[in-house]
Structure formats: C-alpha cells, structure tokens
C-alpha cells in the first residue's frame, strides 16, 4: 500500500469512497466535479490542506482530507482532520492508520501546532494513534 497526494485523476475513486462515507449529507456529483473536488485539490497544492489517498494494487482504497487553519489561540496553524474513509474490504488492515500517520508527519513538517479531529464514531481508533479528547464539537447548520 502507498500513501500519496490525491490528484485530479483520483476523482472517481474518491467520489465512490465519499458516497459510502457520508451519513449526514448526500454528495452531488455535479457539485463535486465542478466545485468541491477541484477546490480541495487546489487548496492542498497551496499547502492549506492535506488531501491524501491510500492506493493498493493501483486502486484508491482510502482517503484523508484535513484543512490547515491559522489560529490565534494555538500560536500557529492547526491541521483539522475532516474526512477519513477506507474501503470496507480493507478496513482493519492498517490503511486508515497509515493515512493518519502520513498526515501527522506532514503536520510536523509544516510545523502545525496540533492535529485535531471531530468524531463521534471513531474515538477509540484515534486514541490508539495518540489522540486525546480535549473538547466537545458542536455544529450549527445553515440549511
């Protein structure tokens, strides 16, 4: 398995993974293709995000998206993990952990102050990778 930067050529695989990942939203392929995916690829290329894929046998089997946010409270940038998903048939084999470790390495290289992740379903997974609980994550929706 290889972890690498996501590229425009990964759009179909990432959309497939995204469609199986989301629980609160329904992805719209037209918006994904025209706006969100190209925008995220561009944001990552500019160093304001980490957009990584795990590839096995020439197929994308997982992805990670984390945004780099400037902060005042932390005295630097925080890398916030927003999306992590792995194909069901390879879960439990270290793919998600490899994506997290790659993001942690990149956070160190970018001199981010910390890596954060809002989660309610995978806290034990993240604790196993050295994360600890520091806050409750609340949301207000515009829709």
Image: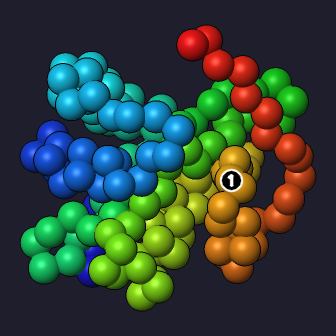
Residue 60 seen in the figure = yes
Q: In this figure, which colouring scheme has been used for the structure? A: rainbow
Vertically, is 91 above or below 135?
below
Residue 17 placement, left or right of 8: right
Which residue appears at 13% of the width and 79% of the height? 57
Residue under the point 31% across and 80% down = 89
Which residue ends up furthest to the bottom in the rendered image? Answer: 93
Image coords of residue 104 (percent x, y): 58, 62
Residue 28 figure quarter: top left
State whether residue 56 is above or below residue 70: below
Residue closest to the far top: 142
Q: Where residue 56 appears, x then y in whole percent?
A: 20, 77
Q: Quadrant of the N terminus?
A: bottom left
Q: Looking at the image, is 46 positioned above or below residue 109? A: above
Quarter-of-image position of residue 130: bottom right
Would residue 96 be found to the left or right of residue 16 on screen? right
| Residue 87, image quadrant | bottom left
Secondary element at tag 1:
loop
Q: Position of residue 132 (x, y in %)?
A: 83, 64
Task: Give the left or right position of residue 117, taking residue 27 as reference.
Answer: right
Give neighbour class at mark 1: few <14, some 14-19, many 20+ (Cα, 10 Å). Answer: some
Q: Which residue is mark 1?
A: 119
Instruction: Work out whether residue 138 or residue 40 is closer to the camera in this orientation and state it.
Output: 138
Q: The C terminus is located in which quarter?
A: top right
Measured as percent of width and height from the top left, residue 62 is found at: 33, 64
Residue 7 in view of the camera: no
């Amino acid at each position: 398995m290889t972890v690498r930067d996501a590229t425009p050529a990964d759009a179909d695989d990432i959309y497939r993974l995204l469609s199986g990942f989301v629980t609160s939203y329904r992805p719209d392929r037209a918006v994904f293709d025209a706006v969100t995916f190209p925008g995220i690829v561009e944001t990552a290329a500019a160093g304001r995000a980490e957009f990584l894929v795990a590839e096995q046998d020439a197929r994308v089997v997982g992805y990670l998206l984390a945004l780099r946010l400037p902060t005042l409270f932390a005295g630097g940038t925080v890398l916030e993990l927003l999306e992590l998903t792995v194909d069901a048939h390879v879960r439990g084999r270290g793919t998600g952990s490899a994506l997290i470790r790659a993001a942690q390495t990149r956070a160190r290289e970018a001199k981010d102050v910390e890596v954060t992740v809002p989660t309610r379903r995978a806290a034990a997974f993240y604790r196993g990778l050295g994360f600890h609980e520091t806050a409750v994550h609340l949301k207000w929706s515009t829709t």
